[in-house]
Image: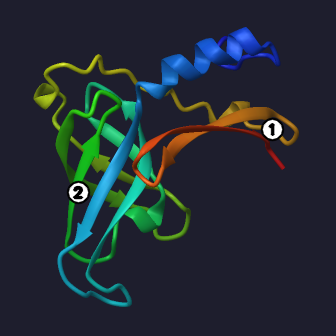
Amino acid sequence: DDLLPTNDSAQWQTTVKRVSRAVVVIKTTGVRSFDTESAGSAYATGFVVDAARGLILTNRHVLRPGPVVAEAVFQNREEVPLRALYCDPVHDFAFFRFDPALLRFHSLTEVPLAPDAAAVGLEVRVVGNDSGEKLSILSATFA
């Protein structure tokens, strides 16, 4: 319950500041056409869910079906290479892995997952990246 802020604006600001350090821009390049995907580059959002293991959670489409070269860019603009780890065949999530020892300046943090806390009507903040350029924060309600 301590992970979930109330509607208090100051508490939301504290929470967003804490979790934004775990949000990364994922830069992907599909090096060649594969299956239904053509070669190309894209930006996406991911977030660190296990700092010790270097696990980043993102959407399934970010981890392309073919060969992919990927990097994570942290809020301080520090970049680390990513390895594709897992892409769920049914649900919309995938994992990348990075070596935490490669981060020299960023204070690494993680966003703990709390699936039991999700409920219809819950007020949330969606923290992500606007086309790889800047951090964006949107208010939303679980439906």
- Distance Cα–Cα, label 1 vs label 2: 33 Å
Mark 2 surroundings: few (<14), some (14-19) or many (≥20) residues within 10 A? many
Which quadrant does the N terminus fall into? Answer: top right
Query: Mark 2 is on which residue type?
Result: Ala
Q: Residue at x 71, y 9 (%)?
A: 10
Percent x, y for residue 95? 36, 51
Q: Residue at x 73, y 33 (%)?
A: 124
Question: Can you name the residue that lies furthest to the front here?
Answer: 133
Q: Is residue 131 left or right of residue 119?
A: left
User: Which residue does the numbered mark 2 point to in the structure image?
Assistant: 70
Looking at the image, tell me whether mark 1 or mark 2 is earlier in sequence order.
Answer: 2
Mark 1 surroundings: few (<14), some (14-19) or many (≥20) residues within 10 A? few
The label on residue 119 is: 1
Q: Is residue 1 visible?
A: no
Question: Can you name the residue that lies furthest to the right here?
Answer: 121
Query: Mark 1 is on which residue type?
Result: Ala
